């Protein structure tokens, strides 16, 4: 749909990945006429994913962008309004909540579902971006199956790297963990489990300087940080396991975040501000899968719908944003935590 100057809705949903679009489907079918602010680029992490083989219902697998297109069409079928824009500022201090997009639209919403996802951190070395989806991955659970019988490299030294390396030994003939220091950051139990695995070896004090290959990964160029010596190591795939960055800068000082910046939930999908809910990878650093994000989108939608009903707000809101005074007159009590954000997302 085209951007309007002002939109009024019962539910504003930030994000159009699996979590946001599933929340949209459920709130649309609950007759709440949600507005999704899709984000730029729209569609989330599955837009940079080729084959998705583990989303139930697609026995032959499906391309990530095609799956998102189906999610979007299904949400729109029940009346979801989708803005291809991103939220640059929000006020959840007063009800109804107000959100402003980079494109100049103001959205007045009785509830908000945050589904802004997370980004995998990459090495940012030559060859890496070009070979993403062609041997470079950031998700062993998603892509490990494609690497049967190959020798693999895992970059990282934390728990995620240990977990990814151990998981990949189910498919690979050999897994080499390349770590820039002489000791892992990972918990002792995880590090020991990985190091005891006969298929895993470690290259200490080493950094990947380049991912090699044209059509697909053929190796990595590694530098020893102590000697400066550079050598090429042949491999059939590279898994980057140096962490994820939740997309929460917009919510700093607005919603409670955990130590590493993920949205904290207070009860189920409720955040620290009453009426604001969280779903998907923006809240979940454990599972990080399309199906779990979609599941959380469903949970947040049901929680939002029930909360709106408790507050006496059932059915769609008036279509245009009301005058602030009139809105204030029928507004429920102020949220538990006061917050205004102007940070960029
Ligand atoms: C390379 C790769 C391959 C993967 N393969 C698989 C796989 O095979 N199977 C699987 O199950 N999972 C896979 N995953 C993981 C899966 O993609 C994620 O778990 C899932 O996409 C998370 O969904 P989400 O809706 O929480 O967030 P995301 O998909 O990250 O979507 C976040 C959305 O929020 C939007 N947004 C951000 N900021 C704002 C803002 N300020 N205003 C409005 N919108 C905003 C973004 O534009 C985006 O639309 C893969 C991930 C990657 C990176």
Image (cartoon, rainbow, N blue to C red):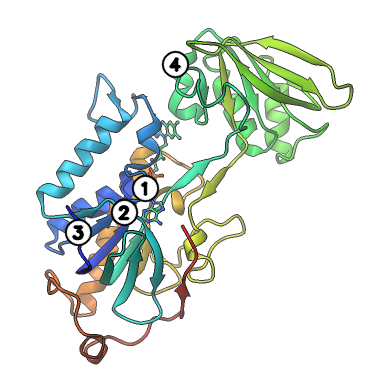
Ligand number 1: quarter of image:
top left
Residue named by callout 1: 40
Residue named by callout 3: 27
- Measuring 59% from the left and 29% from the top, which residue is drawn there? 240
Is the C-beta of the residue carrying label 2 under 8 Å from the nearest atom of ligand 1?
yes
Cβ atoms under marks 1 and 4 closer than 8 Å: no
| Distance in Å between CA atoms under marks 1 and 4 | 29 Å
- Element under disc 2: loop
Image-quadrant location for residue 35:
bottom left
| Distance in Å between CA atoms under marks 1 and 3 | 22 Å
Residue 85 is marked as 2
Is the C-beta of the residue carrying label 1 under 8 Å from the nearest atom of ligand 1?
yes
The reply to whether residue 119 is in sight is yes
The mark closer to the camera, 1 or 3, is 1
- Element under disc 3: helix
Looking at marks 4 and 2 on the same chain, the residue that comes earlier in the sequence is marked by 2
Height in image: 72 above or below 182? below
**Horizontal and vertical percent position of residue 130:** 50, 22
Looking at the image, the residue that sits furthest to the right is 227
**Horizontal and vertical percent position of residue 14:** 34, 57
- Element under disc 4: helix
Height in image: 323 above or below 202? below
- Measuring 62% from the left and 37% from the top, which residue is drawn there? 242
Give the left or right position of residue 274, taking residue 322 as reference.
Answer: right
Residue 146 is marked as 4
């Amino acid at each position: 749909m085209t951007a309007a100057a002002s939109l009024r809705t019962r539910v504003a949903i930030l994000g159009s990945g699996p979590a946001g679009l599933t929340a949209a489907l459920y709130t649309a079918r609950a007759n709440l006429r949600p507005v999704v602010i899709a984000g730029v680029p729209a569609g989330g992490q599955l837009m940079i994913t080729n084959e998705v083989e583990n989303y139930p219902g697609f026995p032959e697998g499906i391309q990530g962008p095609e799956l998102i297109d189906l999610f979007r069409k299904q949400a729109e079928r029940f009346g979801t309004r989708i803005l291809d824009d991103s939220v640059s500022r929000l006020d959840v201090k007063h009800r109804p909540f107000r959100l402003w997009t980079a494109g100049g639209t103001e959205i007045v919403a009785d509830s908000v579902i945050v589904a802004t996802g997370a980004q995998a951190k990459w090495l940012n070395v030559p060859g890496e971006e070009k070979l993403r989806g062609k041997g470079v991955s950031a998700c062993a659970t998603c892509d490990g199956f494609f690497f049967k019988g190959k020798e693999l490299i895992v970059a990282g030294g934390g728990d995620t790297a240990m977990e990814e390396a151990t998981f990949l030994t189910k498919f690979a003939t050999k897994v080499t963990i390349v770590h820039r220091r002489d000791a892992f950051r990972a918990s002792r139990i995880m590090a020991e489990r990985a190091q005891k695995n006969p298929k895993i070896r470690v290259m200490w004090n080493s950094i990947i300087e380049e991912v090699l290959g044209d059509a697909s990964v053929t190796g990595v160029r590694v530098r020893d940080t102590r000697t400066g010596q550079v050598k090429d190591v042949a491999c059939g795939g590279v898994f980057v396991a140096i962490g994820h960055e939740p997309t929460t800068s917009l919510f700093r000082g607005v919603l409670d975040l955990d130590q590493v910046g993920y949205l904290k939930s207070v009860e189920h999908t409720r955040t620290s501000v009453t009426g604001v809910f969280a779903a998907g990878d923006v809240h979940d650093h454990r599972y990080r899968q399309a199906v779990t994000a979609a599941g959380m989108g469903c949970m947040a939608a049901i929680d939002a719908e029930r909360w709106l009903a408790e507050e006496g707000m059932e059915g769609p809101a008036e279509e245009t944003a009301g005058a602030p005074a009139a809105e204030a007159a029928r507004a429920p009590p102020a949220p538990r935590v006061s917050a205004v954000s102007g940070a960029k997302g």
